[in-house]
Amino acid sequence: MDQHKPQLAFTLIEMVGILAIIAILTGVLAPPILESFRNEQIELTIDSINDARQAAASYQEHYGAFPLDTVTATKGIINHRKNPTEPLQVPSTGFDFGDILVYQASLLDTEKTPIGAETKVGPDRTTVKSWAIGCAAIHCRLTAGGGDSGVAYGSEGFVFKSAEHAACVVYYYLPNLTRQEAAALGIKMNGADPSSLIDDAILEQSLIGKTPAEGLQIAGTDTWFIANQQGASFDAYIYLAHK
């Protein structure tokens, strides 16, 4: 006589119920988990900004001045990390003050931060738009990671609160932040009220400093955001030091 073992398989209705429960739990748990991860990335980014600020201050204390990117880009840098015994000067059109801090002065580990993304820009897609620590004279362009895109500083672009009367300014450039990253960083750096960040429109009005042609600027801040591709992403310009 055959003895049938009990069936352990789920019925279709039971499977649908399980999937519904998983979907509900995912919808409830995912947002706070993602927000917690994003907040951690923002805190690490702020640590990187503070490290860069300290490195710039140490450089100025030792050398008494900041090298402008217009000079660094033509003269190149001395790469002590690549060849510590016989450092070679490496000419390039893409070097900035951050490369000096990282490779020549050995005051900083990297220019890259946990948020943002590197992209290729330009008609031939060969110019890299990347993280940068730049040094620009007032009324000169702040370049985007050595690329050909940037914004005018001090004339028709924006002015950092702490460097309104400076001859040159050192800034941190973070490319291609998401709206959420820009909002979270803006809250931390500019002290914006989180309750005002209800939607994208209010986010732009409260945090994002646009170029004059876009009709919106923010006075009295040391962190500026410029919209890319109709607000699909944002570039951040953060004050570090000035002279």
Image: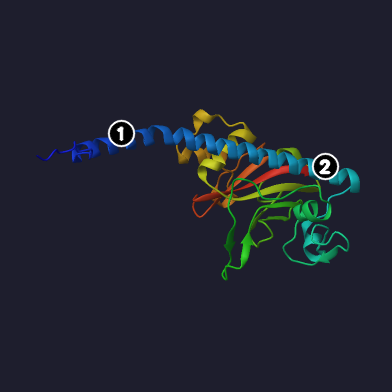
At x 80%, y 44%, the residue is: 55
Q: Which residue is mark 1?
A: 21
Q: Callout 1, which amino acid?
A: Ile
Residue 173 % position (x, y): 67, 49
Question: Going by the image, does 224 lie left or right of 167?
Answer: left
Question: Going by the image, does 100 lie left or right of 207?
Answer: right
Residue 47 % position (x, y): 69, 38
Q: Where is 163 relative to 128, above or below?
A: above
Using the image, tell me which numbered label, if any, was put on residue 186. none
- Residue 188 in view of the camera: yes
Q: Callout 2, which amino acid?
A: Ala
Q: Nearer the viewer, residue 210 or 184?
A: 184
Question: Going by the image, does 167 lie left or right of 154?
Answer: right
Report if the CB atoms under discs 1 and 2 are less than 8 Å apart. Answer: no
Q: Secondary structure at mark 2?
A: helix
Q: Residues within 10 Å of mark 2 (few under 14, many from 20)?
A: some
Q: Which residue is mark 2?
A: 57
